[in-house]
Amino acid sequence: MADLTPEDVKCLGLAVGIDMQEPLLTEVTHNINAIRDLIDGVDLPELVSVEPLSVIPPHLRSWKEE
């Protein structure tokens, strides 16, 4: 899997309302790519049978968690 660029990470952040600037953007990009590399090495065949859950950002929820 190709690494995400800082521009990719910035766009993903903006999509969820986070505007990252340097030097944080470089650090977050590095960390996300490292996590993706680790996850690539995980082999859990049983995950294929699990239905994914949708993720709803807190600001779009009609209810609030306490």
Image (spheres, rainbow, N blue to C red):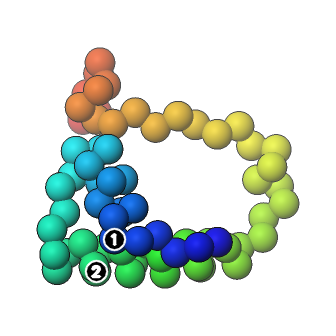
Per the image, the residue denoted by label 1 is 6
- Local SS, label 2: helix
- Local SS, label 1: helix
Q: Are marks 1 and 2 in contact (CB under 8 Å)?
A: no
* Image quadrant assignment for residue 19: bottom left
Q: Determine the residue positioned at 34% across, 71% down.
A: 6
Seen in the picture, residue 8 relative to 58 is either above or below; the reply is below
Cα–Cα span, label 1 and label 2: 9 Å
Image depth: mark 1 or mark 2 in front: 1
Q: Determine the residue positioned at 52% across, 75% down.
A: 3
Left or right? Give the position of 55 relative to 37: left
Q: Quadrant of the C terminus?
A: top left
Per the image, the residue denoted by label 2 is 27
Q: Could you tell me residue 46's position as x and y percent?
A: 82, 55
Q: Could you tell me residue 41's position as x and y percent?
A: 70, 78
Q: Disc 2 marks which amino acid?
A: Glu
Q: Determine the residue positioned at 16% across, 80% down.
A: 23
Q: Could you tell me residue 38's position as x and y percent?
A: 59, 79
Between 32 and 22, which is closer to the camera in this rendering?
22
Image disc number at residue 47: none
Seen in the picture, residue 25 relative to 51 is either above or below; the reply is below
Between 34 and 51, which is closer to the camera in this rendering?
34
* Image quadrant assignment for residue 9: bottom left
